[in-house]
């Protein structure tokens, strides 16, 4: 196995077989193929991995911009480190055409963290920020692995103590929420 594939396998876990062959073909082409691999990932390649949105959430009004999840386990908050800025952000992002805010929050959380969530109620009187809980049992003892499909946007997936974060740690400033009140 070429060294760059070996590094990829160690850095990103659970590369699905359906995508591994495509990624291997692109990566064995050397650095010139990097743009091709990036295009494969950005254009929804291997999207069969993405969990379906909750059917009830699909029939809610379409989001007008984007949506995000607040996931707290063991009093620790799930965040991503945004690759371009190095700042922290909640898992979330822009809605696709006609997609509900709940479906956006679920999809973006999966895409950025690899964690499938149940999207609960809106937080703080907002229509774009939701209390979400992981569908699989987990603890915050160790940071979740960075999934290969997340690496374009995120450099890390982290569990953090939200009380220790400053405004300057956040990509768009500290979210206006009392994280200690969210369980």
Image (cartoon, grey):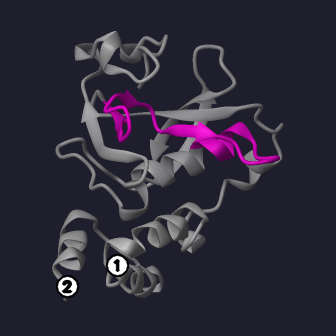
In which quadrant is the C terminus drawn? top left
Residue 114 visible within the image: no
Q: Position of residue 137 (x, y in %)?
A: 34, 53
Residue ID for mark 2: 2
Quick check: marks 1 and 2 in contact, CB under 8 Å?
yes
Q: Residue at x 49, y 54 (%)?
A: 111
In which quadrant is the N terminus drawn? bottom left
**Upstream in the sequence, badge 1 or badge 2?**
2
Q: Give the extent of the magenta segment.
A: 77-105
Q: Nearer the viewer, residue 7 or 74?
A: 7
Q: Around disc 2, counting alpha carbons within 10 Å, would you say few (fewer than 14), some (14 to 19), or many (20 or more)?
A: few
Q: Quadrant of residue 146?
A: bottom left
The verdict on residue 96 being magenta is yes
Residue 25 visible within the image: yes
Q: Quadrant of residue 2?
A: bottom left
Tell whether 142 sits left or right of 116.
left
Q: Residue at x 35, y 41 (%)?
A: 83
């Amino acid at each position: 196995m070429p060294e760059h594939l070996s590094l990829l396998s160690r850095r990103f876990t659970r590369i699905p077989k359906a995508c591994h062959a495509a990624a291997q073909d692109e990566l064995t082409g050397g650095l010139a193929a990097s743009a091709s691999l990036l295009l494969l990932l950005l254009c929804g390649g291997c999207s069969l991995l993405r969990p379906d949105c909750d059917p009830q959430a699909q029939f809610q009004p379409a989001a007008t911009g984007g949506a995000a999840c607040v996931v707290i386990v063991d009093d620790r908050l799930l965040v991503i480190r945004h690759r371009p800025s190095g700042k922290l952000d909640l898992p979330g992002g822009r809605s696709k055409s006609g997609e509900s805010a709940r479906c956006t929050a679920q999809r973006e959380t999966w895409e950025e963290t690899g964690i499938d969530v149940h999207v609960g109620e809106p937080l703080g009187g907002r229509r774009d920020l939701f209390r979400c809980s992981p569908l699989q049992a987990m603890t915050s003892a160790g940071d979740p692995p960075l999934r290969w499909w997340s690496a374009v946007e995120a450099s890390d997936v982290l569990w953090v103590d939200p009380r220790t974060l400053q405004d300057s740690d956040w990509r768009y400033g500290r979210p206006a929420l009392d994280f200690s009140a969210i369980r």
